[in-house]
Image (spheres, rainbow, N blue to C red):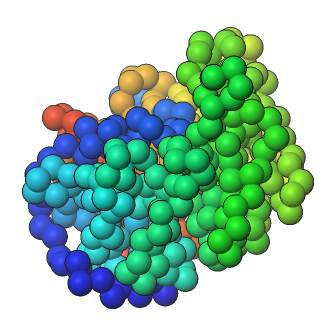
Amino acid sequence: MLVIVSPALRTRGVIMGSTRTNLTIVASVLLLAGQAVGAGPAAADGCPAATGQWEVTDLGVTGSALDINDLGQIAGSSVSASGEQRATVWDGAQVLDLGGLGGGHAYAGALDEHGNVVGSSYTAEEKGHAFHWRAGTMTDLGVFGSVPTRARDVSAGVIVGEYRHVLPNRTARYQAFRIENGVRTDLAAVSGSNAAAVNPAGQIAGTQGLLEPPGPASGRTHRAFLWDDGVITELGTLGGQWSQAEAINGDGDIVGQSALGADGVLAGGFIWSAGAGMRRLPDGGGVAAPKAVNDDDVIAGTLTCAATGTAAHAAVWTGPDAAPALLPDPATGTATMANAVNARGEITGWAEAPDGSRRALVWRPATNPE
């Protein structure tokens, strides 16, 4: 269980500020995954109706909820009164500011059930470094030659992410890594890689062959992979030239996105398993961008409807073959994003307001589902 012992603990109310602006500042030096978009069976406006199986709760801050563990504890960020993005953990009614590494902005990207939280923070030198937080102590993981690093996930104490390095020809690439018991191991041999997620068995989902900058879609050839005890398995594609992994569950099933054609422009969501390989998620003619999957293969992500093609909606698939359903919107917000789902079916994410600010959200299974 996450033990909250920091004297910085305080309950937060509504904090004004733009999380979009602050998150962009931190993320500008970190490797980011692709844009999340998606679609489903038609309603009046071409989008599926919002499901009555989940209820939405605003966490009371301007910010983002990025992960949720099986205890219901949430990791993310909130914006302080001074406009700084703060790494934040919600544990029931308690809200903990994790602090930072000396810079002005930080966010908590993931947490496990054993009190481990990982994320990224600016240092005093304004460099983005990965951190590991436990029992009130934040450890700087960004010591790989003092280059930008990002910790993406943690499970059973194993941390995964990527760091930026410069090749002999002076081009920059990211390198996926794992850290266990303080020992770092680089993963993919192919230049340009990230590690998106790790499960309790230590299996890792990631992507290799990433370019920086990405370049035109037609030239991208990066591939999603599974790392299992030192062996890398490429997952293939849905017919196009690229794929990228976003999450892995306890059974080793992986979700992500893949190009559908040679031009690399149109993308679809996928789920991959060792037995069935890569399958496209139902999307109703739009574009699905799954971001998380639990052990029951409940998938959370984002859907951009075929009829509108612009607004992104947080969505859920109750199984790999299930049609997507939109998660209910909060009172305010023009777009919503779902980032994580736990064993209880609780989903975290955010809503984006017209002014670009974000509200941290959690969707929970409805007490009296419609």
x and y percent of residue 25 in the render? 32, 39
Given residues 266 and 79, the one toward you in this image is 79
Whether residue 293 can be seen here: no
- Identity of the residue drawn at 74% across and 33% down: 191
What is the count of numbered marks? Answer: 0
Using residue 231 as the reference point, say whether residue 332 is left or right of it: left
Using residue 112 as the reference point, say whether residue 278 is left or right of it: right
Given residues 117 and 286, the one toward you in this image is 117
x and y percent of residue 76 in the render? 37, 60
Q: Where, quadrant-wise, is the C terminus in this rendering?
A: bottom left
Whether residue 367 can be seen here: yes
- Identity of the residue drawn at 69% across and 29% down: 167
Given residues 156 and 171, the one toward you in this image is 171
Q: Is residue 324 above or below residue 37?
A: below
Q: For residue 267, which quarter of the picture? A: top right
- Identity of the residue drawn at 86% across and 49% down: 232
x and y percent of residue 158 in the render? 66, 69
- Identity of the residue drawn at 18% across and 34% down: 354
x and y percent of residue 285 in the render? 57, 26
